[in-house]
Amino acid sequence: MPSILIIEDEPDMAAGLKDNFEFEGYDVIIAHDGENGLAMALSHTPDFILLDIMLPKKSGLDVCRELRMRKSKIPIIMLTAKGQEIDKVLGLELGADDYITKPFSVRELLARVKAVLRRVPDSDETTSESVTMGRLTLNFQYYEATEGEEPVEMTHREFELLKYFYEHSGKTISRDELLNQVWGYESYPTSRTVDNHILNLRKKLEVNPAHPRHLLTVHGVGYKYIN
Ligand code: CA
C-alpha cells in the first residue's frame, strides 16, 4: 500500500485529502507546517508527498529544496494557489515532479499522483530497447532513429533531448531544466536555443509540427512530452 505525506496547513483541506487518499487505499500521514513536514518526510520516507506552498514555519518551496539537497528522490506534487505562476516554475525547478492549482478536483489529483508514481521506477534507467515517440522509433543506446524503415538524421543533442523528455513523460519541464540537464552547466546556450531544438524535433516527430500532439508547449513554463 503506497504511503503518502500531506503537508498542508488548512485543516479542512488536509482532512479532505486524507479521507480521499485513504479511500483509495493509501497510508496517509499529515504535517501542518513546513518544519514538521520536512522532518516527517525524512523520518517516514513516504512513497509520495503532497506539498502546499504557503505553509507556516517553512515554505513548501524550502521543504522541496531541502529534500532534494539531501538527495531525497521522493516524488513531490506541489499544491499552488491561483496566480502563483512564479511559484509553479520555481517548484518544478526545485525538483518537484508536478504541481496542481487549487481549487482542483480530487479525481484530477489522484490521476496526477498515479501518473507520477508510475514513472518513478524508470527515472534512472535507460532502456536498451527501442521506444516510439510520435513518428519516430528510437534506440537511445545506439543513437538510432527511424521512421518506418527509413533512418532519420538526428544530432547527439537531439537524442539527449528526446531521451530526457521520454524519461520524464508527462512532466512539465522548464527551459532552464533542459539547459541544465541536457546542455550542462558549463555551456551557456540561451533559452532560444532550446526553442529552436524543439522546433526541429517537432518536424521529425510530429505528424503536423504546427499542431504538436506529443511535444507540447506549456506557456510561460517550458515543454511537456506526452506519448
Ligand atoms: Ca497553505
Image: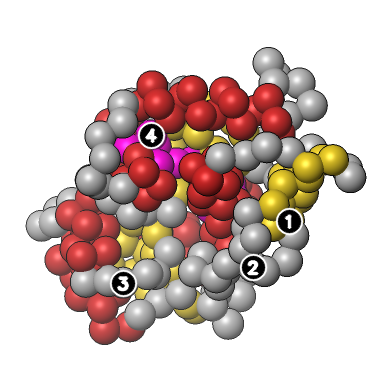
Give the vertical position of 59 relative to 223 (above or below).
Answer: below
Which residue: 27% across, 71% down? 71
Q: CA distance from mark 2 to mark 4?
A: 25 Å
Would the CB of label 1 be found within 8 Å of ligand 1?
no
Question: For the residue labelled by badge 3, is the local secondary structure a helix, a strand or a loop?
Answer: loop
Give the vertical position of 61 relative to 7 (above or below).
Answer: above
Q: Give the quarter of the image for residue 50.
A: bottom left
Which residue: 67% across, 69% down? 128
> Are the two marked residues, 2 and 4, in contact with CB atoms closer than 8 angstroms?
no
> Residue under circle 1?
131
Quadrant assignment for the N terminus: bottom right
* Sequence-wise first label, 2 or 3: 3
Where residue 107 appears, as percent x and y from the top left, is: 63, 50
Question: For the residue labelled by badge 4, is the local secondary structure a helix, a strand or a loop?
Answer: helix
Callout 2 amino acid: Thr
> Residue under circle 4?
175
Q: Which mark is residue 72?
A: 3
Q: CA distance from mark 1 to mark 2?
A: 8 Å
The reply to whether residue 160 is in sight is yes
- Tell which of 222 and 195 is nearer to you: 195
Magenta range is: 168-178
Which residue of the protein is positioned furthest toward the left in this rendering? 57
User: Dot 2, crowdedness within 10 Å: few (<14), some or many (≥20)?
Assistant: few
Where residue 39 appears, as percent x and y from the top left, is: 20, 75
Question: For the residue labelled by badge 1, is the local secondary structure a helix, a strand or a loop?
Answer: strand
> Are the two marked residues, 2 and 3, in contact with CB atoms closer than 8 angstroms?
no
